Image: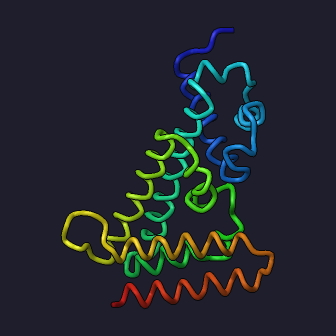
């Protein structure tokens, strides 16, 4: 049976969405094409009709992951517009986000993997990092040069680092203390 263009596009998006989740859970090299396609409810045979290579899928899934992460920040701000940075910090450095690896921050889940990828994947990560920096710069004030503020770069680095370290330890109490300590520092830095 022939697949319509609309169905082909739906399948394409389903693979990108599934890969976005599965890559964050397993890493780029931790899951094969067969399991990626199975995660999207499709067979491996259709992969090369939709993507030029696994790297092509990695790039597209990385872009989707970063877009989803930025949207989660936007949603957090919408829930608490009177304290937008507090809203982002409360969400991002929460125990729930700590335990949400497959839907959580791609900078934490895949940052080290992305560093070993080619320019297409890095470009998607770069765009996502810049978007997060833009959001933080808007909330904390820019340095006036049109680029991200130093404060935004420090805050993003602290938050990503804290979540990364918290996921890397077995000691749950230590993980939570790391998140709380950085949340406190974010508030202090933003107040300066």
Q: Quadrant of residue 176?
A: bottom right
Residue 125 vertical position relative to residue 57 in the rendered view, above or below: below
Q: Quadrant of residue 28?
A: top right
Q: Quadrant of residue 140?
A: bottom left
Residue at 75% x, 85% y is 173
In the image shown, does 62 or 76 lie closer to the viewer? 62
In the image shown, does 123 or 102 lie closer to the viewer? 123
For this view, does 28 lie left or right of residue 65? right
Residue 102 vertical position relative to residue 181 in the rendered view, above or below: above
Residue at 31% x, 66% y is 148
Q: Quadrant of the N terminus?
A: top right
Residue 21 vertical position relative to residue 91 in the rendered view, above or below: above
**Going by the picture, which residue comes out furthest to the left?**
144
For this view, does 126 lie left or right of residue 59? left
- Residue 19 x/y as whole percent: 65, 41
- Residue 26 x/y as whole percent: 73, 50
Q: How many marks?
A: 0
**Going by the picture, which residue comes out furthest to the top?**
1
- Residue 180 x/y as whole percent: 60, 86
For this view, does 173 lie left or right of residue 165? right
**Going by the picture, which residue comes out furthest to the right?**
170
Q: Quadrant of the C terminus?
A: bottom left
For this view, does 2 lie left or right of residue 34? left
In the image shown, does 56 or 64 lie closer to the viewer? 56
């Amino acid at each position: 049976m022939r697949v319509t263009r609309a169905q082909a596009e739906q399948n394409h998006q389903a693979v990108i969405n599934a890969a976005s989740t599965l890559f964050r859970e397993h890493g780029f090299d931790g899951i094969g094409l067969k399991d990626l396609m199975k995660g999207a409810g499709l067979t491996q045979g259709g992969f090369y009709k939709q993507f030029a290579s696994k790297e092509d899928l990695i790039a597209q899934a990385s872009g989707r992951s970063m877009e989803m992460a930025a949207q989660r920040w936007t949603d957090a701000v919408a829930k608490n517009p009177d304290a937008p940075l507090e809203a982002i910090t409360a969400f991002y450095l929460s125990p729930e986000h700590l335990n949400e690896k497959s839907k959580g921050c791609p900078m934490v889940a895949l940052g080290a993997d992305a560093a070993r990828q080619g320019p297409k994947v890095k470009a998607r990560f770069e765009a996502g990092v810049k978007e997060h920096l833009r959001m933080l710069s808007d909330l904390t004030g820019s340095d006036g040069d049109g680029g991200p503020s130093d404060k935004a770069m420090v805050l993003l680095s602290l938050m990503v680092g804290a979540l990364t370290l918290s996921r890397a330890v077995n000691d749950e109490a230590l993980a939570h203390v790391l998140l709380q300590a950085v949340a406190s520092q974010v508030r202090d830095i933003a107040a300066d």
